[in-house]
Image (cartoon, rainbow, N blue to C red):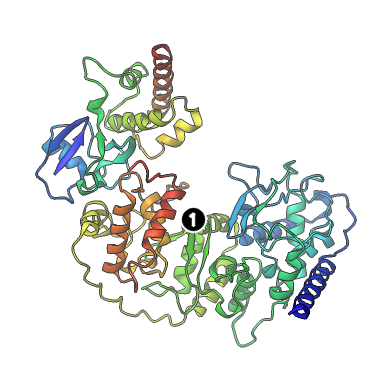
């Protein structure tokens, strides 16, 4: 079947009930999304489907025909990180780092529909994703920082 | 013909006049709110437990608002009703209500000023509350912190926006039998019956309502619809494939979920949250009474799953649902066995649509079931395929009935627009 991943049409030969996460990592070599619990409960596998955060470990590819999938790789590279990634680096919002990709994609989903979220809105939106290291306060600061930077950039460009 | 018209007109005038007359209640003189010192601490404490059993807080508190300060919107088939402020604020709450005024509201559905109250306030149940319990409830509510919060005006369709019509509704449907214990039953059963029929007002959601919004007397606890959810039948028509017992019902009411039967959701989650403040003995009594009404406690064989044709629904189930719902040991850390779930067997698919779309949110500190919502990755069509397949596979009698409408309602409720898909 054909999947639209990070703006590219990708033809993959998998069973239709295969979770998207396995296709991203196993077939397409996109290792940003992580396998955490495999039950849609921790958020390490979070990607965007039509701009909404989704757990890729419990999303069968059969559900995704014609939908736009965005992974961490869509935001920037190690050499040229995007604003959200820069904000996570600036706030040192990772300890072991396993949840980070999912956190960033969850935040990306929030900032796409709400460019100026309040602290309460950030907390509510990030609630499904877990961090076992206790980096939550830095993650919240990073999202706030990214929101301000991205909003300011958009203003000065617009 | 002319006489018929005249006669009809005369009857209409007489009828309206009659209603206006029935509508008339005297105002009860405003009184100073009695202070906390007027009540023994034990009285207030008993009132708090009754308020928990009566689920007063969740209806009378707006999302994020002060407890009991009202303003919560209740969607009804007749429009939106806003719950009143029942804190002792003199201007916007019940601060000027005497015990007599409070009791009249509970027993007759009339406020202190003499206005009829809409039966969204379940006074058709509260007539069965004893005078002693009325007094305890009053002591508790009148000693809460007063909150100044005016209630938004109701948004009801014509003619339901005319309060005097409530007099007609009461004439037709409002009966005031006091609670009568059944000497043939145990004390626990009778305590449960008293609570269920009165303060806990289970029938307000679990009994179907007629076109004028009154509970159907012939179908007590036969299952009803409320706030976009289906409240399961609590009589012999219960859809639970595994029979409930007094023990499993008690555990469900105590913790908000039970390993074989799953989680309380929607308006029932609010009820089980409130029940955290209710005493064990009373929850056991409710469970005993309801379990007795559900009929036999002998487990019957779970019906064999119906073979459902392989389809999109099955593919989605295998990819999205099976991993948690099969072979992982059940709630709270994995999904319920869908062959044993009331939700897949219910006559109305709305709850299944709500859960697949919105998931089961995490709450509290204790382990409890959670489930991701799939509304963001499934289209309405895919959701309907999945639900139709689940119901066919796991044994609902009419698997496809009402599915499309249920999915549409669930998605609208979650703010998912079909236009985007």
Q: Residue furthest top?
A: A156
User: In the drawing, does residue A76 fall left or right of residue B370?
Assistant: left
Picture coordinates of residue B256 (x, y %)? Answer: 48, 58
Residue B309 placement: quadrant = bottom left
> Counting other residues with Cα less than 10 Å from the Cα at mark 1, is it few (<14), some (14-19), or many (20 or more)?
some
State which quadrant residue B324 falls in. Answer: bottom left
Question: Residue B262: percent from the left, percent from the top?
Answer: 40, 61
Which quadrant is the C terminus of chain B positioned in? top left
Residue B343 versus residue B24: which sits nearer the camera? B24
Q: Is residue B246 left or right of residue B203?
A: left
Left or right side of B91 for B395: left
Please state the chain letter of the residue tagged with numbered disc 1 in the rendered image.
B
Q: Secondary structure at mark 1?
A: loop
Nearer to the camera, B246 or A12: A12
Q: Above or below — where is A40 with respect to A107?
A: below
- Where is mark 1, residue-wise? B266
Front-most of residues B245 and A3: A3
Q: Quadrant of the N terminus of chain B?
A: bottom right
- The number of numbered discs placed on residues in the rendered structure image is 1
Is B184 situated above or below A21?
A: below
As drawn, the residue found furthest toward the left would be A13
Which residue, as the protein is rendered here, is positioned at the far right?
B29
Q: Position of residue B391 (x, y in %)?
A: 31, 66
B286 to B255, vertically: above or below: below
For residue A31, say whether it is visible. no
At horizontal 28% and vertical 58% (from top left) the residue drawn is B385
Query: Residue B386 location in percent, x, y?
Result: 29, 58
> Can I make out residue B332 in this image?
yes
Quick one: which residue is furthest to the front in this view? Answer: B2
């Amino acid at each position: 079947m054909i999947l639209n991943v990070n703006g590219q049409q990708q033809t993959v030969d998998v069973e239709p009930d295969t979770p998207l996460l396995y296709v991203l990592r196993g077939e397409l070599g996109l290792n940003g999304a992580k396998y955490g619990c495999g039950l849609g409960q921790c958020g390490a596998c979070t990607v965007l489907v039509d701009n909404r955060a989704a757990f890729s470990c419990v999303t069968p590819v059969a559900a995704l025909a014609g939908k736009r999938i965005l992974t961490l790789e869509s935001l920037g590279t190690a050499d040229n990180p995007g604003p959200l990634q820069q904000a996570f680096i600036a706030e040192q919002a990772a300890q072991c780092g396993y949840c980070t990709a999912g956190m960033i994609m969850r935040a990306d989903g929030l900032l796409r529909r709400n460019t100026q979220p309040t602290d309460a809105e950030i907390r509510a939106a990030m609630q499904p994703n877990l961090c076992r290291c206790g980096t939550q306060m830095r993650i919240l600061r990073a999202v706030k920082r990214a929101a301000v930077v991205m909003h300011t950039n958009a203003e000065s460009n617009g | 013909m002319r006489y018929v018209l005249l006669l009809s007109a005369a009857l209409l005038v007489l009828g309206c006049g009659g209603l206006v007359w029935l509508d008339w209640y005297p105002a009860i003189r405003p009184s100073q709110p009695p202070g906390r010192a007027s009540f023994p601490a034990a009285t207030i404490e008993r009132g708090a437990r009754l308020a928990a059993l009566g689920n007063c807080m969740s209806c009378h508190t707006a999302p994020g608002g002060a407890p009991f300060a009202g303003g919560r919107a209740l969607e009804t088939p007749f429009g939106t009703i806003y719950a009143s402020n029942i804190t002792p604020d003199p201007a916007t709450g019940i601060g000027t209500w005497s015990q007599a005024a409070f009791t009249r509201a509970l027993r007759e559905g009339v406020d202190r000023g003499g206005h009829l109250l809409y039966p969204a306030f379940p006074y058709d149940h509260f007539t069965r509350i004893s005078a002693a319990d009325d007094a305890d409830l009053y002591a508790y509510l009148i000693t809460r912190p007063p909150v100044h919060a005016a209630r938004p005006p109701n948004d009801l369709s014509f003619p339901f926006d005319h309060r005097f019509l409530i007099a007609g509704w009461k004439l037709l449907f409002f009966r005031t039998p006091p609670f009568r214990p059944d000497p043939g039953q145990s004390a626990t059963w009778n305590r449960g019956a008293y609570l269920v029929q009165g303060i806990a007002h289970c029938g307000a959601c679990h009994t179907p309502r007629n076109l004028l919004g009154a509970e159907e007397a012939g179908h007590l606890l036969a299952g009803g619809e409320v706030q976009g959810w289906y409240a399961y039948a609590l009589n012999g028509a219960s859809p639970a494939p595994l029979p409930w017992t007094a023990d499993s019902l008690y555990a469900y009411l105590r913790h908000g979920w039970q390993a074989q039967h799953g989680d309380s959701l929607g308006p029932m989650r609010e009820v089980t949250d409130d029940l955290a403040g209710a005493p064990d003995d009373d929850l056991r009594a409710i469970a005993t009474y309801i379990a007795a009404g559900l009929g036999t406690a002998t487990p019957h064989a779970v019906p064999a799953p119906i073979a459902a044709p392989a389809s999109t629904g099955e593919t989605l189930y295998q990819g999205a649902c099976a991993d948690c719902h099969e072979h992982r040991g059940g709630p709270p850390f994995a999904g319920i066995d869908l062959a044993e779930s009331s939700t897949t067997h219910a006559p109305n698919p709305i709850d299944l649509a709500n859960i697949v779309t919105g998931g089961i949110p995490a709450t509290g500190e204790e382990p409890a079931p959670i489930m991701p919502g799939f509304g963001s990755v499934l289209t309405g069509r895919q959701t309907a395929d999945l639900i139709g397949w689940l119901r066919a596979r796991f044994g609902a009698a009419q698997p496809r009935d009402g599915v499309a409408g249920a999915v549409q309602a669930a998605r609208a409720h979650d703010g998912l627009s079909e236009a985007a898909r």
